[in-house]
Image (cartoon, helix red, strand yellow):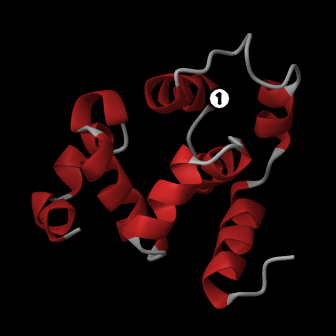
Amino acid sequence: RKLVFFLGQEYRHELLDPSIAGLHLFIASLDQDYDLGSDFLLRLVGGEHVAPLLLLLKGQGQPVDKATEIVVALRGATADTMMPDWATIYADLDPVEARAAIASWKSGDAE
């Protein structure tokens, strides 16, 4: 996480792409954004369901095409193997609401 902090904003784009930054720097970048802890984020990203990862990406404001690339890079999933309407659902998510839901994970208020 310190490395992500010291790299600065000029590298932000690369850090948000696991195919460029690698898993550890990508997770550190998410941790920088959400302060959830890298172990927790690794469990979310590698978990059975892709929904938490999509919520994290939406909270960052990632467009649907970039979210697709990240999911493919991290999970090996493709749009064909994911939930049929996931792109529509993702596009309809509000980034502010996504960040509020993520904040509830940290505070332990998740439903």
Whether 103 is drawn above or below 53: the answer is below
Q: Is residue 29 left or right of residue 7?
A: right
Which residue is denoted by mark 1 in the rendering? Answer: 64
Q: Nearer the viewer, residue 92 or 21?
A: 21
The quadrant in which the N terminus is found is: bottom left
Q: Report x, y in % for residue 87.
A: 77, 26
Measuring from the top left, give residue 38's x and y in whole percent.
38, 66
The residue located at (24%, 38%) in the rendering is: 21
User: Is 101 placed left or right of 29 in the picture?
Assistant: right
- Does the image show residue 60? no
Quarter of the image with the C terminus in it? bottom right
Q: Quadrant of residue 27?
A: bottom left
Residue, far top: 80
- Find residue 37 and report its horizontal and vertical position in percent: 42, 74
Task: Give coordinates of residue 72: x percent, y percent.
Answer: 52, 22
Q: Which residue is at 71% across, 80% downward?
A: 104
Q: Residue at x 80, y 48 (%)?
A: 93
* Direction front: furthest residue: 48
Is residue 74 shown to the viewer in this render?
A: yes
**Vertically, is 2 above or below 61?**
below
Q: Is residue 80 above or below residue 104?
A: above
User: Under tag 1, what secondary structure?
Assistant: helix
Q: Residues within 10 Å of mark 1 (few under 14, many from 20)?
A: some
Kind of residue at badge 1: Val
- Number of marks drawn: 1
- Judge by depth and name the residue closer to the eye, 63 or 55: 55
Q: Quadrant of residue 107?
A: bottom right
